[in-house]
Structures are given as C-alpha cells and as structure tokens.
Amino acid sequence: MNRFEEIVWGGLVADAATMGMHWIYNQKRIAKVTKGKPEFFDCDPANYMREEGESEAIAYFLVHEGKQAGDMSQYGEQLLVMLKALARNKGKYSRRIYEDVFYEFFGPGGEWVGYIDRPTEVTLYNYKKRERDAYDKAGEFSNGLTEEERWLLDDKAMVLFKFYDESKTKEENRKKFHDWIVYRRRFDTEKDDLRIEYCNQMFDIVYESKEGFCGDRGDDQLPAIAKLPALIALYYDKDNFEEVVEAGARLTNNNNRAVSFAKVYGAMLKAAIETRDRMAVIEAAKVVAVPYPELADLIERALSMVDRPHNEAGIHFGITCHLTYSLPLDIALIYNCDNYVDAIRMNILAGGDNCGRSVMIGAIYAALYGLGENGLPQGWVNRLTKKQEIKTLSKQVLKSDGLNA
C-alpha cells in the first residue's frame, strides 16, 4: 500500500470502525456493550436507550439508524468526497470541484442518506444560494431582451455550467460557452447578438461568484478536519501546504478558529508522515500552536493529564463535537498509545463525537505505523462497505499525481 493509500484508509477505516458507537455519551454503556472490542458494531437503537436504573445520559439521538458495520458516518464520507474530487481533477486539489462533488453527494438527489450536521447543511445552502444570487444579478443586465428571453437563457446556461471543465482556463471555458450559444442561433442577427452579449455577461458574473467559500462562518466543529487527510497526504511536502490545509478546512467551516485547529492537525499528520515518531507529532502541534494561545494552553493541559485514564481525560475536556474538546483528547491519546488498534479503541470508548475524532486519529496512526503489525489491520480494511470504490479512487489519484501505486 502506498503512503497516500495508508493515510486515506487509516482515516476511513477508523470512522467505519467507530460508527456503531457514535454519539453515545455514556462511557459505561459503550464499555458494557462492546466488552473491550468496540469496533465495527451495527448501529443498534437499543444501545442508545436508557436502561432501567441508569441516571446518566446515553445519547442525544439515534443518528445512524439502519447503518451496518462497515458503513461510514458523514465524517468519513466527507473524506471520501475529497478522494472523489481529487480523482476527478487528476490528483490535484480544486475547491470548486470539491464543492461540486460535495453537493452532488450530500445534496438533494445525492447518494447520501443519513444525518446532515450543521456545517454540511450550511455549506449545501450557501452553495445553491451563491448560484441563485449570481443568476439574479446576471438577470439585472438589460440589453433589449425581454424578461422571458432572459429567463430562457438563464435556464440553458445553468445546464451548460454543469459541464464546466476545471482543468481548462477561464477563457477556454468561455469559448465553449460562447460556441454553444452561437450554435443555437435563431437566424435573427440582432437578437442573436443580444443573446451572446447577455450570456457572456452571465458567464463572468457566475464564474466570479464561485470564488467565495460556501462553508459555515460560525462553526468550529470537527467537519473542518474530516476531509484533510487526503489533502495532507498529497501536499505535505509542497510549498503551498499550509494554504491547501486552510482551504480544506474552509470548505465546510469558513471560520478562523476552525482554521487554527486545522493548521495544528495538519502539522501533526505531516510530522507523522515525515518522522513516524509519536512525540514528533506532539512537538509539531506545540510549535504550530504558538501563535494561538488557546490551542497552546489546551495542548499543555492535555500533557499534564497523560497519566490519567483516557476516559477521565474525555470527561475533563469534553467529548462533544467542537475542536476545542477534540485536540487535547487527541494529544493525550497520541502520547499514550503506540499502535493503531488500541488508539481507535481508546477513542471509541471515550464516547461522544468519537467518529469526528476518529478520522484524523486513524490517519495519523496509519502514517505512523502503516499497514500490519502496530498499524492498520488488513482485516479491518476488508470490512469497509465501500472498499472497492475507495481502492479504485485511490489508484486514480495515485496514477494522476504520478506517485508510486
């Protein structure tokens, strides 16, 4: 397995292994149900219900009902969307292509059936709003066409924009757009010239509208880092690494606080790839956190608790969906755990948003230990429902990028 594949599989397998115990907040319930091996459980409604005599909260709601062992949560699927986007664009990151694939997968009529978290919901809404606002603005251009004629052109242009080729330049796409309009001339020279003028104006407005991020400006939760492992695995040694990590976070979380956490996690995975040393991963986090006092403090507090059981650390720092809670818990886990299986199990048993934490933890441990002994078990890889799709997409990215498959 190539290092890129190990990292992607590491994140996706960890998410699937965790899904059956996702968002259960009662650590005792998880331990009781799973008996020390909490990976790859079906999402059983009974595990989310309070039993007689229990006073502690179990879960907020049953979020993955109907899913079976080997399926992924929405976090793992975000990473898979990134893999699809990279494969579509010949192994290169493109924000526009990721957004398109994201909407195709999570949006109406898409493949995803399941829970939609807040950043995903807001990103989907902003994606369509950005498009609607652009066409409304374009429709204000009046050059002699009737309102009905402009509406018809809007409708046709929307179809054509679905075939926008990100691998081509703006001018090459404009020519394709222009040729399509000319091909449909109605042999009314004056009207056709007006149609061409209107559509060219529309092209510029819609194209420029796609420059802005669709991500949620008010959210600092774990979707910010879910899709990052594939990007980091491709760009960790490139000059634009930090720029790509920030862009990746802003795809769903266009929030400065979320970006600061993404930079720290990016440095951690990069260090794992380059050094295969757990302590180097923690040192990288400390270095990148220096400009962010809140994050630096969280890391130091985590390191002060590494002699405490991990479940206790989870209760101390919090196990909900915010990056503020995940970072110290992950630092403590990395300090104490020296193999992939134990790391994933420890994370699951801590409860709460363990799927949200699992993707990056799985990627880091796969980068540290690879496949096999101390690393990602092949038996776990084989359990993924989408194993063949992941394998195919990974090979496409590797082939396009020129990496050794």
Image (spheres, rainbow, N blue to C red):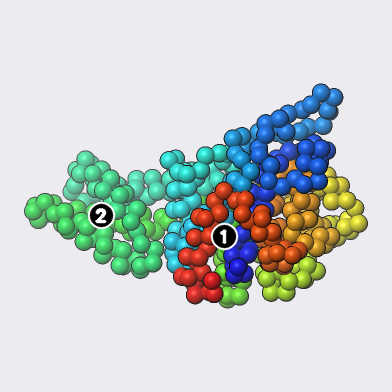
Give the image location of residue 253, x and y in percent.
59, 52
Residue type indicated by callout 2: Cys
Q: 89 or 294, which is in the foreground?
A: 89
Task: Bin the neighbour count of mark 2 within 10 Å (Cα to Cα): few under 14, some 14-19, many 20 and up.
Answer: many
Determine whether, in the image, residue 379 is placed left or right of residue 339: left
Residue appearing at x 66%, y 39% in the figure:
42
Give the image location of residue 318, x and y in percent.
79, 45
Image quarter in which the N terminus is found:
bottom right
Q: Which mark, by number, is residue 199?
A: 2
Give the image location of residue 405, x and y in percent.
54, 71
Helix, strand or loop for disc 1:
helix
Q: To which residue does mark 1 refer? A: 248
Quarter where residue 173 is shown: bottom left
Residue type indicated by callout 1: Gly
Give the image location of residue 246, x and y in percent.
59, 62
Residue appearing at x 71%, y 47% in the figure:
39
Q: Is residue 251 visible?
A: no
Residue appearing at x 38%, y 45% in the figure:
132
Q: 126 or 53, which is in the foreground?
A: 53
* N-term-proximal mark, 2 vs 1: 2
Determine whether, in the image, residue 69 is placed left or right of residue 145: right
